[in-house]
Image: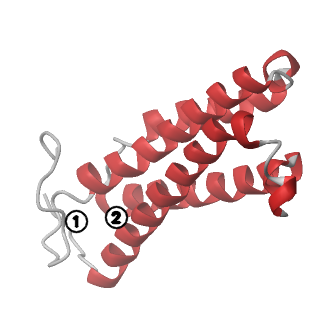
């Protein structure tokens, strides 16, 4: 079912949000998963800022704002809630990790929690791209949808 007032520019923007969100969340997962193994190498390469908690907080805040904007955009135009589950679970893990010192201070537990949270945010963007936009008649619509679009 198409949204009654179909706006191709807004639809394109929504797809762009999701594609950029998938890319950013995937980079987040790679960063978080590899950080325990590369933390000693980063300062030698002049990239010590990538291991700082400040970088992590900024990236977490920006990714949260971007993910909520993207999924809310689809909710507004398509009335689909498919991506909210993995998004809220992923963000809950990401922020929960920050609030539990026992996890946050252990490098491997920190990496595992942040990687899982980032992966769930990436999945939310993917689900949003495939399910919420599946009924769109735009020329840039996904070729296939996962399951029924309703």
Label 1, secondary structure: give it: loop
Q: Residue at x 17, y 76 (%)?
A: 138
Dot 2 crowding, Cα within 10 Å, few <14, some 14–19, many 20+: some
Q: Which residue is mark 1?
A: 3
The circle drawn on residue 148 is: none
Let me know if residue 80 appears in the view. yes
Dot 1 crowding, Cα within 10 Å, few <14, some 14–19, many 20+: few
Marks 2 and 1, the one that precedes in the sequence:
1
Q: Position of residue 20 (x, y in %)?
A: 47, 65
Residue contact between numbered discs 2 and 1, judged by CB atoms under 8 Å: yes
Q: Residue at x 79, y 42 (%)?
A: 39
Left-right relation of 46 to 120:
right
Between 81 and 122, the one lying in front of the other is 122
Q: Quadrant of the N terminus?
A: bottom left
Q: Quadrant of the C terminus?
A: top left
Q: CA distance from mark 2 to mark 1?
A: 6 Å
Label 2, secondary structure: give it: helix
Between 51 and 62, the one lying in front of the other is 51
Q: Which residue is mark 2?
A: 77
């Amino acid at each position: 079912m198409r949204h009654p007032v179909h706006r191709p520019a807004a639809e394109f923007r929504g797809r762009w949000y999701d594609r950029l969100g998938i890319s950013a969340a995937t980079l987040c997962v790679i960063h978080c998963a590899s950080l325990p193994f590369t933390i000693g190498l980063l300062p030698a390469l002049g990239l010590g800022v990538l291991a700082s908690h400040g970088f992590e907080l900024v990236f977490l805040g920006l990714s949260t704002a971007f993910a909520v904007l993207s999924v809310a955009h689809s909710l507004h135009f398509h009335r689909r809630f498919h991506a909210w589950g993995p998004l809220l679970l992923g963000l809950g893990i990401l922020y929960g990790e920050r609030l539990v010192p026992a996890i946050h201070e252990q490098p491997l537990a920190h990496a595992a929690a942040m990687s899982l949270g980032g992966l769930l945010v990436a999945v939310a963007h993917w689900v949003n791209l495939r399910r919420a936009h599946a009924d769109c008649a735009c020329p840039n619509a996904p070729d296939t949808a996962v399951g029924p679009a309703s």
